Structures are given as structure tokens and as C-alpha cells.
Image: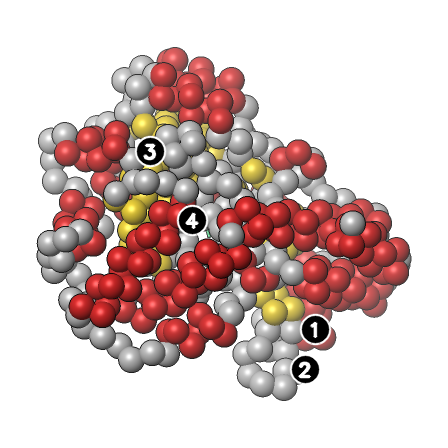
Amino acid sequence: MTTCPNLRKTREKLLLGPGPSPVESRVLRAMAEPTLGHLDTDFVAIMDETQKLLRKAFQTKNELTVTMPGTGSAGMEAACVNLIEAGDRVIIADHGVFGRRMQEVAERCGANVVKVSAPFGRPLDEEALFQAVRDNPDAKLVGVVQAETSTGVLQNLDQIAAFVHDAGMLLLVDAVTSLGGMEVPVDRLGLDVVYSGSQKCLGCPPGLAPLTLGPRAIERMRNRKTKVQSWYLDLTMIMRYWGEERFYHHTAPINMLYAFNEALRIIDEEGLHRRWERHRRNAEALWAGLEAMEIDLPVPYQFRLPSLTCIALPEGIDDGKLRQNLMERYCLEVGAGLGELKGKVIRVGLMGSGSTANNVLFFLSAFGTTLNAMGRKTDVGASLDAAGQVLTA
Ligand SMILES: *Cc1c(COP(=O)(O)O)cnc(C)c1O
């Protein structure tokens, strides 16, 4: 992809793709503060504050709430390696690319993985998942993606959590594209292991994976017969670094943690509920604007994610060309389709500080005028009007 000739300054592009999301200057400035030692008392105070703020963001009292070095996938890997032993049977559901990634990671842990799949663009069939739980009573854990970024589909967890817990299994949840943008009901539903990524709705650069484990998951870790396969991601050691002992395990990514701490402060200042409402309202405005342009949204309304919208490409519009035009003319990044949706959709993220009324109106006008220039006539005025009505309601 070429860079944007409209840029006044280098690299000032608007990130409305599936992540990373735009990072506020406050967060970037925090990152530029002097590097401290990983056992320095001032740094340790930042770790403690980060941990408190992260528990608030996860809405949990879980003692074991930390950030792992690495991106969201490191969180996925950490959750799997700590809770799965070779030979364990686990059930991992997928309704898109990231559920499949979790299956792959679990397989690499030596698990016997039972897969339950949903078609692209739909959530899981809960009854099919429950049947897999009934058919595999020896399964130790069920893994589910709450916010599937490859399709923009939300998976409701209420019934699943109750069923999985009744069966005595642990529930592992991917909250990479939900944490900070909508409710992740960690304590309300007793989700056992939940991980996320710093660069989506949390508004931080990529590089950290927040992770929280509840009491049942810790008990499972304690009862392992074998050592965790990965030395680096072994939580039994990492928890000793985040705890009172400050046991040296690895050098914490100091400046990333400054940034993450600042991003969590911004979330705390805004308030979780207000932040979710903001994500919701701006997504509703985007959807109204697209519908007024007669653009098809493949995911039915009740399953849509506020943080990521899948947009079907009109007949004859080439996905690569469209995204290139958006970048060259408007310095605007959106995502390509993944998996089965490659070439058929674009993905628009309104995540973290990227979820604003201005960005919705800007995206709709950039997208509409670009489609017009590519020969597909759309009513940009009607689109902005429809979005504006949601934004001013
Ligand atoms: C982005 C994403 C991941 C992977 O995160 P990386 O930061 O790219 O490693 C995992 N799951 C979901 C749902 C995601 O959106």
C-alpha cells in the first residue's frame, strides 16, 4: 500500500481499521518519560496503580490481573499454556479467524481439541456448543471469542458461562476487541480466564496483553501435573513479579507500561459505562449512515459489535483499490476482509479514541465520495444526515 500524499506530517493517518486504533498524545507522551529499572520503587508504584486500574477495566476483583509482554496473541498463548496440559481435552468454539487461532494454539499445547464452529458472520449456535459439552464430559475448558474482529460479530456469554460452569469446566474468553469498548462481564459471569490486547478499545499502542484469572483457573494451574510448556509465559513466576515479592522473571517493558497506565487513566476518567455508550452511539450512527447509502451490513443488527463493523462491498468495487483510494485521498486506514470474507468486505473499527462523531462523519463522507468516484453512485448527503440524526438524538 502506498503512503498518503496528502500528509502534512509523516505518519499522521487515521486508523479506523481492526486495530491498532488511534493513540492519544497523552499516552504517547507518557511513553517518552525516562526509562526506569524494572524493580525501581517508582516503577513498582506504576505497576501497582496499573493493576488497580486494570481490575476496574475488567470489572474484577481477581488478584491475578496483569499485563503480559506481547500483543493480544501473547495473551491467548499465555491463557492456553497455563491452563492446558498435553493430553487434556478442551472445547474451543470459533465464529471467525480468532477462534480458529485459539484452536491452533490449544493444539500446539498438546490438547485434544473439540471444535465447534459457526458460519462466518454469525455467532455460535449455543445449543451446538452445549451438546459438545455434554458429549465431552471430561473436557477441562471451553474457549470462546467474545468480540470476533474478523467478522464484527458479538458472542453473548451469559448462557454459555452458566452451562460451562455447571459442567465443571473453565471458561476462557478472548476479549481483545471488547475490553474498553463494551461490557466484559468477568466477575458478573465468573469468567475464569480473560485476555485482551492494548491496541484496540483500550487506546494504547500494540505491545501488551492484559490478562485476568479467577480462583478456579488459579486452582487448575496449581494442580498441574507438568510444568507450563513456555518458560516466558509461565504465570506462576510472573505473578511473583507482580506480587509483593517482586521476584525477577523478565525485564518488564517499562515504557509500554507507562503508556498502558496512562491509557487506563483515560478510561477511568471517562468512566466505563460512558465509554461503552460512546462506542455504541458512534457505531449506531455509522450503521445508520451506511444503510442510508444502501450499503449492506452482512451481520444482523442484534449480533453487531460496537467496535468493529463489517461492510459488504457493492458489486464491482475492488477491495484493494477502494482501500488504496481511501488512504491516498484521505489518509484513512480501514481493514480488509479476513478468511471467507476476504475481497468481499472492508472492516471499519471505531475503537478507543477512534470512536468519535467526527470520525463517523468523516468516514462516511470519505467512503461515499470514493465510491462515487469509482462509479457506484451513493447519496452521501443522505448518509451524513442519517448519521447526524443518531449523533444528535
Ligand atoms: C487482534 C485480535 C487478536 C490478536 O491480537 P494481536 O494483538 O494481533 O496479537 C486476538 N483476538 C482478537 C479477537 C483480536 O481482535
Q: Earlier in the sequence, mark 1 or mark 2?
A: 2
Proximity of marks 1 and 2: CB atoms separated by less than 8 Å: yes
Q: Which residue is mark 3?
A: 192
The residue identified by callout 4 is 57
Q: CA distance from mark 1 to mark 2?
A: 7 Å
- Dot 1: few (<14), some (14–19), or many (≥20) neighbours within 10 Å? many
Q: Give the class, few, some or many, for how many residues have Cα within 10 Å of label 4's Cα (few <14, many ≥20).
A: many
Amino acid bearing label 1: Tyr
The secondary element bearing badge 2 is classed as loop
- Cα distance, mark 4 to mark 3? 16 Å
State the mark number for residue 330: 1
The amino acid at mark 4 is: Ala
Amino acid type, label 3? Asp
Chosen colour scheme:
secondary structure
Badge 2 local density, few (<14 within 10 Å), some, or many (20+)? some
- The part of the image, by quadrant, that contains residue 61 is top left
Answer whether labels 2 and 3 touch (C-beta < 8 Å).
no
Classify the position of the N terminus by image quarter: bottom right
